[in-house]
Every structure is written in structure tokens, then in C-alpha cells.
Image (cartoon, coloured by chain):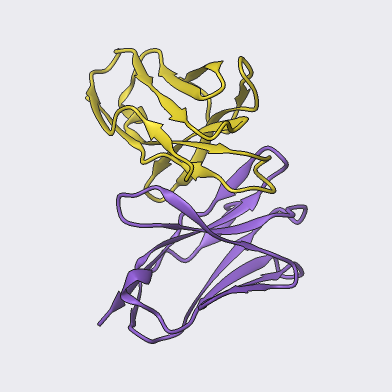
Chain colours: A purple, B yellow
Amino acid sequence: RKEVEQDPGPFNVPEGATVAFNCTYSNSASQSFFWYRQDCRKEPKLLMSVYSSGNEDGRFTAQLNRASQYISLLIRDSKLSDSATYLCVVNKNTDKLIFGTGTRLQVFP
Amino acid sequence: DVKVTQSSRYLVKRTGEKVFLECVQDMDHENMFWYRQDPGLGLRLIYFSYDVKMKEKGDIPEGYSVSREKKERFSLILESASTNQTSMYLCASSLSRVDTGELFFGEGSRLTVL
């Protein structure tokens, strides 16, 4: 079993739609969770950290479910500019992060 | 803005050649990292460094070495390139430990080994 698993997609959604991605992780001791965004042929950039209580940043909402060991990312009112690959990232320990292989989102007009 | 600069965006090398990938960050970050990214495998950590002259093995260090002589510079070395080292290499830096802080990535170096 992979340490971090994501549905690769692609998720093809129209502008204005709401879309959600899940990510499961295997290490129950993990304490830190993040979503990174990677545009085509670009470097990953931090989108948001995921806190135990859940957190929201504009149209983006991240949730953590420790019991089931998954994190989610919800995007409301999708924009064309949201088209990218979303990487789920979980810490292995204080030194190492484990990156998922990413979920590709394509928003169409 | 944090800037992480990788010296070469695209390289083509032959099997057995020695390859240097250079990375420089301008934000006085203590921590620097080298990852490789391959389709279906995600980003995998090769080496990291939390201080000058300090290095730690990541998850896939075989076939690689690193050098950190100055705080702002972290070099990845392939002593004898092989075709299975064809990949996108990403350098990153961070102000704090990875479990608490943001990683800032360079634009990547795409290496092809023939």
C-alpha cells in the first residue's frame, strides 16, 4: 500500500462547479498535512495546510479525518485558473514529507 | 518573494557522465532538499540538508551525492549518470522543519540520460 494515495483523475468539471478530492494516508502517526498545487510544467506551490479542525481559504476548504486517515480538498465555484494537479502531502516524521502522485483537475468553460 | 533558482532547466547527458545540478536560494533558509519527480511515483526525496556541510539521506539516495558548502547553495551530483536517472529534479528550501513549514521549490531541472 502506498503511504499516500490519491485518485489521479482527471476530474473534468465546468466553471462554477464544486469539486472534491480525497487523499488517504497510511501512517497513523502523521501530524502534518498539506495540499500543494502544481501547474503544468511548473513547480509545486503550497496551497494550504490542513488543520485538525478543518480550515477554509476563500473557495478552498480542507478537512482532516484522523479516524479514517484521509484528508480532503473542496473547491467551490471552480475557475478556469483552478486547472492544475493537486498534491496531497503528509509528514512521515519531522524530517520528511511524503507526496501523493497528485489529482489532476481540468475546469472547462 | 522567496526565490529558488536551479541553474539548468534542461540537460541531456550520456550514460556514465558526471552531472552537477546546482540550486541557490536567496532567503537565508536553513533547510534545503533535492527531490525527483516521475510520473506515477510523485516526488521522492533524494537528499536534504539542515545546515552548511551537513547532509542527510532521503528515501532514494543511491547513485547520488550532494554538497552544501554555503548556506544558500545545495548541489546534487550524479557521479555516473544512468538511464534510470532520467527525471525531473526539483530543489526546495524551507525556513522551518518540513512538518511545520512551507517548501519553496525551484522550477526544476529536466535531465535526460541517453
Residue at 50% of width from left, 40% of height from top?
A: B44
Q: Nearer the viewer, residue B5 or B86?
A: B5
Q: Nearer the viewer, residue B72 or B77?
A: B72
Does A39 appear above or below B108?
below
Quadrant position of residue B36: top left
| In the displayed structure image, the side of residue B24 where residue B8 appears, left or right | left
Q: Percent from the top left, x then y, of residue B56?
A: 63, 24
* Quadrant occupied by the C terminus of chain B: top left
Q: Is residue B109 visible?
A: yes
| In the displayed structure image, the side of residue B9 where residue B61 appears, left or right | right
Does B68 appear above or below B33?
above
Residue at 45% of width from left, 21% of height from top?
A: B75
Q: Percent from the top left, x then y, of residue A15?
A: 33, 84
Q: Percent from the top left, x then y, of residue A20?
A: 50, 77
Q: How many marks?
A: 0
Does B52 appear above or below B98?
above
Q: Is residue A10 visible?
A: no
Residue at 72% of width from left, 41% of height from top?
A: A94
Residue at 39% of width from left, 33% of height from top?
A: B5
